Image (cartoon, grey):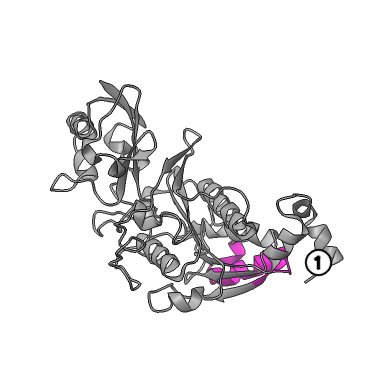
Amino acid sequence: MELSEDQIERYSRHILLPEVGGKGQKRLLSSRILIIGAGGLGSPAALYLAAAGVGTIGIVDMDVVDLSNLQRQIIHTTEDLDRPKVESAREKIAGLNPDVTVTTYPFALTAANAREIVAGYDVILDGTDNFPAKFLINDLAVMTRKPLVHGGILRFVGQVLTVLPGESACYRCLFREPPPAGAVPTCSEAGVLGVIAGVIGTIQATEAIKILLEKGHLLTNRLMTYDALTTTFRPVSVRRSPKCPVCGDHPTITELIDYEQPVCTTPGI
Amino acid sequence: MAVTVRIPTPLRKLTGNQSEIREEGGTIREVLKNLEVHYPGIGERLTDESGELRRFINIYVNEEDIRFQDGLDTKIKLGDEVSIIPAIAGGAE
């Protein structure tokens, strides 16, 4: 594949970077990223990955756009209310960059369909809002050996972790299982500063691009935490656990699991 | 000996919205015990009935997970910083 004149101009600021160049840009254009969740994290991630010229973006989301989403889910607009999020996202991406092919999955990711959906993608970006999905996606990444960029947000804080299955710590090495249902109120009660989704979602997109370009130091074996109230980024080290139930030496979880739990939760409130 | 303990947002309503607390203790277990004395209710958010750290919460001493040190018996030195980090899930909805 050769870059067209339009493409050379469109991606010129990338091509100028030695770490990207024409070769890296062509690599991005032939890459495939699966974004799970077209919400707070998925919105900025999808827009920047589309602008960057990632050739194929898959988007999984079963929801329609709700008025309360628009405070942070910047890929959707007021005119998109009640429309499927995947359709709204597809339109914005098409308007932004015709080089990008969008594949939509307007349903929930489940243990039954996850392997089929993820086949053919190079990187998974987790933009989901609930622990069952986050553990399902982690296990899916480990079992299918797909790099994963995990993100989570709540109130004024966010977390990001990149997982290279077989090489670096996975989300279960960090947190072994979802918190029990019941002790966990919903995110709509806890709230979130909308812009936190932008900070964390764009870090996730950055990690995804670094994975595709094979450049830089990834956020592996480090959980980056961000606190907007104190404007503090703080990494904590994470280690691959030999006892990890999914990526350890003797895994006890060998099939994907659908946990039952209300969406959008946080423990300990 | 007092160390700085960073309190995650979900627990700050138990600490009067303080994000950092100075607390006494030679080990993490002692620090948690003192936290519970000063901020009742915080203990059960962090540890289960058997006194073990809950599985969706990690504690770090200077950015190192205590699970890879001596767990709750990890010793603390002057100037150490203790961070409590829970899993958080929000993102889409």
Bounds of the magenta segment: A78-101
Res. A92 image quadrant = bottom right
Image position of A87 (left or right of B88): right
Tell me where residue A125 appears, x and y as whole percent.
Answer: 52, 61
Tell me where residue A120 appears, x and y as whole percent.
Answer: 56, 75
Q: Which residue is mark 1?
A: A3
**Eyeballing the image, is A141 above or below A200?**
below
**Eyeballing the image, is B65 above or below A97?**
above
Tell me where residue A19 appears, x and y as whole percent.
Answer: 70, 51
Q: Residue at x 51, y 46 (%)?
A: A196
Tell me where residue A239 appears, x and y as whole percent.
Answer: 38, 49
User: Is A258 within the magenta?
Assistant: no
Which residue is outermost to the left?
Answer: B50
The number of callouts visible is 1
Answer yes or no: is residue A96 visible: yes
Q: Nearer the viewer, residue A41 or A9?
A: A9
Res. A46 image quadrant = bottom right
Which residue is outermost to the right?
Answer: A5
Q: Residue at x 23, y 44 (%)?
A: B45
Answer yes or no: is residue B42 visible: no
Q: Nearer the viewer, residue A178 or A24?
A: A24
Amino acid type at circle 1 is Leu
SS majority, magenta: helix
Q: Residue at x 29, y 40 (%)?
A: B69
Image position of A160 (left or right of B1): right
| Chain to which the residue tagged by mark 1 belongs | A
Q: Residues within 10 Å of mark 1 (few under 14, many from 20)?
A: some
Where disc 1 sits, the SS reads loop
**Eyeballing the image, is A261 above or below B28?**
below
Quadrant showing the N terminus of chain A: bottom right
